[in-house]
């Protein structure tokens, strides 16, 4: 019983933080043009910037990568990859500090106590998704972390038209202390960059 109370408390604290009405970060409609205040999430294999987006699939809102000058995004639903070119939003923000914190499926909820993870969407009847990334095959992959799943908060991403998942990744937070050195794949490009 004590274990369930602790888990409930951690989830409630994390949910409260991620539902903050702070206007530090916001979603703008994406029309193929990267806004000046867009937050950069990393780089692809050709050193081109990747940005953070989300798209509505049915009643779900899923985190997706956005590539400059490409109006389509690849997302997934029920394990199948879909190409979507409407209803896309791009993550933008102010000058508040942002960072990527290392986490895993097992420790996601504990690592983020006292931090502010950026909420990146929601799965209807399941819960919130947060913004995650991983360095995979020489480029950054951005996708949703299934943060509503207490012991299996995995990151899912699309690679070569397949939906893959990992249990070790980085999660986007704001107003957090710097916890590690700068990553080499966050060194240039348009939009707001962060470590």
Image (tube, grey):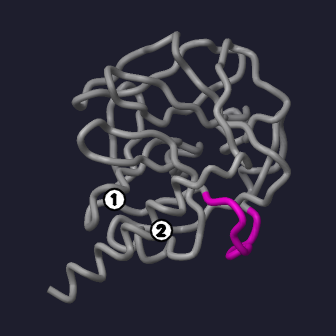
Q: Is residue 9 left or right of residue 98?
A: left
Foreground pick, 178 / 174: 174
Q: What secondary structure is found at the residue carrying circle 2? A: strand
Find the residue positioned furthest to the front: 21
Stretch in magenta: 173-182
Which quadrant of the figure has residue 28? top right
> For residue 175: magenta?
yes
Instruction: Point out the tag, 2 or 1, that comes first from the N-terminus.
Output: 2
**Going by the image, does 116 lie left or right of 193?**
left
Residue under label 1 = 153
* Above or below 160: residue 7: below
Could you say whether the residue bearing mark 1 is in a helix, strand or loop?
A: loop
Taking the spot 52% from the left edge, 16% from the top edge, the residue there is 87
Disc ID at residue 103: 2
Label 2: how many residues lie within 10 Å, few (<14), some (14-19) or many (20+)?
A: many
Which quadrant of the rendered structure holds the C terminus? bottom right
Residue 67 place in picture, x, y as percent: 64, 25
- Please check the rendered image and state whether residue 154 is part of the magenta-colored stretch, yes or no: no
Residue 190 pos. (x, y %): 84, 33
The image shows residue 178 at horizontal and vertical percentages of 73, 73
| Residue drawn at 43 percent across, 33 percent down | 62
Q: Are marks 2 and 1 in contact (CB under 8 Å)?
A: yes
């Amino acid at each position: 019983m004590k274990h369930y109370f602790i888990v409930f408390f951690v989830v409630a604290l994390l949910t409260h933080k991620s539902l903050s009405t702070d206007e530090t970060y916001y979603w703008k409609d994406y029309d193929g043009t990267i806004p000046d205040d867009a937050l950069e999430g990393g780089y692809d294999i050709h050193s081109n910037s990747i940005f953070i987006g989300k798209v509505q699939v049915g009643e779900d809102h899923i985190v997706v990568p956005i590539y400059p000058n490409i109006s389509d995004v690849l997302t997934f639903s029920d394990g199948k990859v879909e190409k979507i070119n409407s209803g896309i939003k791009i993550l933008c923000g102010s000058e508040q500090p942002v960072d990527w914190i290392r986490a895993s499926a097992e420790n996601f909820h504990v690592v983020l106590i006292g931090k502010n993870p950026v909420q990146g969407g929601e799965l209807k009847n399941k819960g919130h998704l947060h913004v995650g990334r991983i360095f995979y095959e020489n480029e950054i992959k951005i996708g949703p972390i299934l943060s509503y799943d207490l012991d299996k908060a995995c990151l899912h991403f699309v690679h070569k038209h397949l939906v893959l998942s990992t249990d070790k990744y980085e999660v986007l937070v704001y107003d957090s202390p710097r916890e590690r050195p700068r990553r080499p794949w966050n060194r240039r490009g348009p939009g707001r960059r962060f470590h």
